Image (cartoon, grey):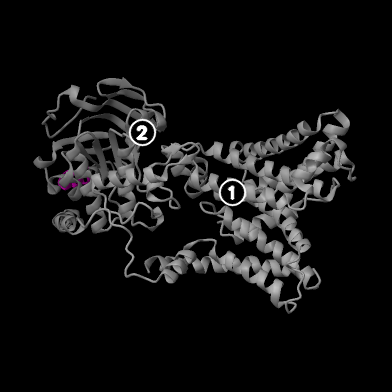
Amino acid sequence: MTAVTPDGKAAPAAPTEDVLRVEHIRKRFGAVTALRDINLHLAKGEVLALLGDNGAGKSTLMKILCGFQQPDGGRILINGQEVTINSVDHARELGIDVVYQDLALVNQLSVYHNMFLKREITRWPFLSNKKMRRTAREHLDELGVNIPSVDVDVAKLSGGQRQAIAVARAVFTDAKILLLDEPLAAMGAKEAAMILDLVRDLKQRGDVSVIIIAHNYGQVLEISDRVNLLQHGEITFDKASEDTSVTELNDIVIEEYRRALAERHKTA
Amino acid sequence: MRARKDGVEVSETAERTAAVGGPRGGQPSRSGPPGLLRRAAVGFMQQREATVFVVVVLLIVYFGFISSAGRSTFFTKLDLINVSQIAGPIIIIAIGEVFLLICGEIDLSVGFTYTLAPFMMHYLIDFYGVPGILAIILSLVMGLVVGWVNGFLTVAMGLPSFVTTLGTGFALQGIMLITSHAEQSAIPGPVQGIGHWIGEYAWAEIGWAVILVIIFNLVLRRTRWGLHTIAVGGNQLGAQEAGVNVARIKYGNFMITAVLGAFVGLQVAFQTSVIDPSSGGYQPMFYSVAAAVIGGTAMLGGSGTIIGAFLGSVMLAVLTDGFNVIGVSANPLPLIFGAAILLAMVANVQFARLRERGRAL
């Protein structure tokens, strides 16, 4: 099976500019085919929205990209170089970082200690807290992350603030490709806006590419450059965000659901 | 249905975006200019160790002045030495337990490492002719090995440390009883000199305890080791994802605790001038864990302080000694300890809320 984009329109980006290319990635778990034939590409500084219902294969794709699982076939290219991503650490070395919803932060530590966790600035044998505090502050200001103080424990921050700090930390630690897993799930209006602003800021900086995995079409359409739809382990839709709409995306998903229902009736 | 919902959210997003753009990088708001005294009081109450510090002061005042109408012997040199000698070993073991509790583990075996260490020294010197200093060092190394084994069983074998150290504790006790035939031994000649400095001089134990408290307080609060220990206890998965070597932190803290236990065992042997199979055991371990908890260390990991554990240990020592001073039987002591631990916990939980409010002042 070849790359299918039923709605036509191959994306314009030249291969050399792609920081990430995924070609014909397959993955099976026993009898279940999670990923049939995944082809996607991500240009430098691009924000790609990866949409799909539960069970479409989003999380499997994520796990492969962050080195947690190995694909059965196909290849992954980073900056044009074919790579085998062995582990989460290896993925991070390659510049790929996944931000799960605030799961990676340590509640009992201050914002700046979280930002610097495992990359602390030290003047042996002690931590250079002053320097870390100042750098963290500068970095968050630069990204427009609005928190009252970098000294507060992360536990005292809201879900959105924590998520923002998790994203900021990933950028801070030289991630070039950010995978945001459902960054807006279970988030209030203000909070979601904060994260969307942050992604917008990243886009303006241009050196970080982002894949946002989400359910909510509306919010991500606003900030993404391109939308990919993942259905049954394949990318079935690839369009620039401005050329599509929430209605169109919904129609595709609903139509697909109807077709599946009809087929089931036929066989029954 | 979905389309309608999403449509609404799209239109709202713009407003939200506008609403969120508040000032960046403000300081925590401290409204008004509160008086120096009040600020000092608020600052003090914000310290986690404040509660136990107040309790210690009250106890000292009670045993020193009130309980016997000013004629108390509490402030005599002899009695202060007594308090310090009770507190020292609890403090030193509590240091280790604080590190372990913070990273989400516990060591129940440390009291048996304590018992075995001086026997180890005795065997090495008297049966194998090992020079005194080397024998002491090897006894401490034995502590490191015990800590490593605790770490191995917990980290690599995946046992809960509660179970691991319950098992190794019994094993250590068995080894000690088999090898010593459950009989006391004298301090070997070659180490009697250095023994003064380790534990025999009146102020040796509290001296070591204070030095170790200062060092390990710095380790916990100002070094990567301390930061990573908190990170591992606060969010093990998160710490691991950030690249923290969780296993290394746990092995290390088990080893710190066990080596401190071995050191205390040697100290007490020198202080009492006898190597006793019945010293150590569960009691010093439980006192230390109690001191850590009274001092504000969370049993579930992620937070704790060395200073708090120090104060907790002093509190238990003052209570123990105070009852001697006022001439009351020691029988109600465990009851008082139990009440003290529970009260301290309640106070910690309640004062944490007060401190939160204090921060808003």
Q: Can residue B115 be seen here?
A: yes
Q: Relative to B284, is B217 on the left or the right?
A: left
The foreground one among A146 and A162 is A146
Q: On residue B200, which mark appears?
A: none
Residue at image location 72% in from the left, 57% down from the top? B84
Give the magenta-colored segment's residue range.
A250-259
Q: Is residue B96 visible?
A: no
* Quarter of the picture holding the C terminus of chain B: bottom left
Q: On the rendered structure, is B22 left or right of B333?
A: left
In which image quadrant can residue A39 be found?
A: top left
Residue for badge 2 = A66
In the rendered image, residues at marks 1 and 2 fall on the same chain: no
B335 with respect to B240 (left or right):
right
Dot 2 amino acid type: Cys
Q: Residue furthest bottom?
A: B69
Disc 1 vs disc 2: which is toward the camera? 1
